[in-house]
Image: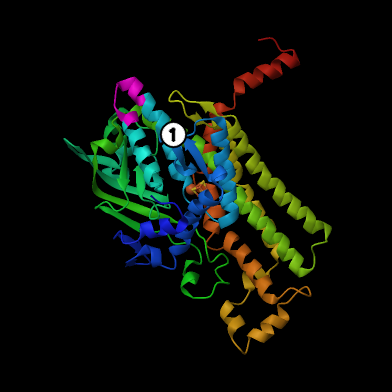
């Protein structure tokens, strides 16, 4: 069983995965300098559970013992709230995406959806799924949830595409299971997972039966290929040194998963043909996942701290406009957190007995996340000054000819070494332009659904007719 971060890193070794990065097959992802920081971020989730079990573990009735919170099926409102608290803390500790929430949210949404499918169709999915989760809890594995398909022509559904593989589908049925083919895009932490759970990505019609499939696949299954997504400034990790990377220890991970005829045994199938439950699953998953984006407030805490230090190092910490910009950043950050934690506090019990957050507030949280980190990044760059985009490299600091001159001319306030100023500048660059801008900005935009997806959900739930009635009554307009 995996307990510590070190156990986790050891568990990833020697899996012989088919991983490609920068045009080459990666022999051992654990040792690749571009990949390793993303593994460190997941390892941090294990260490947090050891250091702070009250934050990152929970008592599981399913297993009859404490389990990692990322594998826990929520049993109360407090459990849902605790997920958000843990996510903010891990964002503060890593300054990046720590990748495990996708699995947590998939486990919780599938727990209730498999129960409801069984009620409607007398299928055996829920019991199977409980056994799967108990097994994951037993080993303390990382489970990834794989939802987003390539989608091809967005005006066409899965079964209407010119190429039928643009959504993951069943290509063959055998007595003991099914064979899957297709791809999943933008998969957070997939190479750092032990298992991935493949799920449909959108509402399906009766013609899409082969696309209505949920199944668990071990990451080292034959037929899986992973192609690593580039991140801005990723090759700085190959240069040596630790200043220019900004956050040398931690990064996020997104990769494309190619599923080239992978067999999934019956015992690991949790939906197979129940097209009418695809939309339910997507909506339930996004209710969890969109308020999981309070993770970004942990990153926001780091960015606010970095901006405050940059101002302090420059000697302008006392200026009122500096204070005001920091207050503005804090206000934006807490507005994100406010909606997310409120969504969790408004959780309700599902028919299966676990708890799920309020959907409208979850969508408001995620919609705030598509905007506010960008404004916070703008303010951080404002406070950091132009040097955030013009600072010479660490190698120039190390060069005996240029190093002393850089230390002389890049020193600002007395008592603050130029290197400290360079490090905090690079951290701001990392989060707003570099590797972790992937997690802090663009993932904030598109992860868990792009802005329009939240507007659709908000529109569905905003209760416009009821609001019109309220206005009419007060204005004295008869029906
Ligand atoms: Fe978790 Fe946030 Fe990363 Fe999603 S983006 S996996 S919610 S840390
Ligand atoms: Fe994500």
Left or right: where 51 falls relative to 26 = right
| Residue under numbered circle 1 | 109
Image location (x, y in percent) of residue 134: 37, 38
Residue at figure coordinates x 50%, y 71% from the top left:
236
- Queried whether the magenta region covers residue 125, the answer comes back as yes
Instruction: Kindly indicate the quadrant of the structure image that contains residue 310.
Output: bottom right
Left or right: where 387 falls relative to 28 = right
The C terminus, quarter of image? top right
Magenta extent: 117-127
Left or right: where 398 falls relative to 379 = left
Residue 152 seen: no
- Queried whether the magenta region covers residue 343, the answer comes back as no
Image location (x, y in percent) of residue 425: 65, 67
Pick whichever, 318 or 60, lies toward us: 60
Residue at figure coordinates x 47%, y 50% from the top left:
99
Image location (x, y in percent) of residue 121: 30, 22
Instruction: Kindly indicate the quadrant of the structure image that contains residue 397.
Output: bottom right
Residue 445 seen: yes
Residue at figure coordinates x 34%, y 62% from the top left:
20
Determine whether the residue tagged by mark 1 lies in a helix, strand or loop.
Answer: helix
Left or right: where 397 falls relative to 112 = right
When the figure is inspected, residue 260 is found, relative to residue 201, above or below; the finding is below
Residue at figure coordinates x 59%, y 49% from the top left:
89
Pick whichever, 112 or 426, lies toward us: 112
When the figure is inspected, residue 269 is found, relative to residue 473, above or below; the finding is below
Image location (x, y in percent) of residue 249: 52, 64
């Amino acid at each position: 069983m995996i307990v510590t971060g070190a156990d986790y890193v050891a568990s990833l070794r020697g899996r012989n995965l088919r991983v490609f990065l920068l045009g080459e097959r990666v022999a051992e992802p654990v040792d690749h300098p571009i990949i390793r920081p993303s593994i460190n971020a997941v390892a941090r989730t294990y260490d947090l559970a050891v250091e702070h079990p009250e934050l990152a573990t929970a008592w599981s009735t399913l297993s009859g013992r404490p389990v990692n919170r990322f594998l826990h099926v929520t049993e109360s409102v407090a459990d849902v709230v605790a997920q958000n608290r843990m996510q903010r803390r891990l964002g503060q500790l890593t300054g990046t995406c720590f990748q495990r929430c996708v699995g947590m949210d998939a486990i919780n949404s599938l727990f209730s959806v498999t129960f409801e499918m069984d009620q409607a169709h007398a299928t055996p999915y829920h019991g199977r799924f409980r056994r799967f989760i108990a097994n994951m809890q037993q080993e303390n594995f990382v489970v990834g949830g794989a939802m987003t398909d390539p989608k091809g022509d967005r005006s066409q559904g899965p079964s209407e595409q010119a190429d039928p593989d643009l959504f993951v589908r069943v290509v063959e049925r055998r007595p003991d299971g099914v064979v899957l083919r297709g791809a999943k895009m933008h998969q957070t932490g997939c190479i750092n997972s032990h298992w991935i759970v493949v799920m449909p990505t959108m509402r399906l019609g009766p013609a899409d039966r082969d696309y209505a499939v949920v199944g668990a696949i071990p990451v080292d299954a034959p037929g899986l290929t992973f192609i690593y997504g580039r991140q801005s400034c990723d090759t700085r990790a190959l240069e040596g040194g630790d200043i220019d990377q900004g956050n040398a220890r931690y990064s996020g991970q997104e990769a494309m998963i190619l599923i080239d005829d992978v067999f999934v045994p019956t015992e690991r199938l949790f939906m197979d043909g129940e097209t009418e439950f695809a939309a339910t699953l997507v909506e339930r998953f996004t209710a969890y996942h969109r308020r999981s984006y309070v993770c970004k407030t942990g990153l926001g805490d780091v960015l606010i701290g970095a901006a405050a230090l940059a101002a302090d190092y420059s000697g302008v910490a006392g200026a009122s406009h500096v204070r005001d910009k920091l207050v503005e950043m804090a206000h934006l950050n807490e507005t994100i957190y406010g909606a997310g934690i409120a969504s969790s506090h408004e959780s309700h019990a599902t028919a299966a007995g676990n708890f799920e957050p309020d959907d409208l507030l979850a969508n408001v949280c995620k919609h705030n996340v598509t905007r506010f980190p960008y404004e916070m990044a703008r303010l951080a760059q404002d406070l950091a000054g132009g040097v955030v985009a013009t600072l010479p490299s660490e190698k120039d600091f190390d060069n005996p000819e240029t190093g002393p001159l850089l230390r002389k001319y890049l020193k600002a306030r007395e008592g603050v070494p130029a290197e400290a100023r360079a490090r905090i500048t690079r951290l701001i660059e990392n989060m707003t332009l570099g590797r972790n801008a992937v997690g802090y900005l663009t993932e904030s935009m598109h992860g868990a659904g792009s802005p329009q997806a939240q507007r659709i959900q908000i529109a569905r739930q905003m209760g416009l007719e009821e609001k019109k009635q309220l206005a009419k009554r007060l204005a004295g307009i008869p029906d």
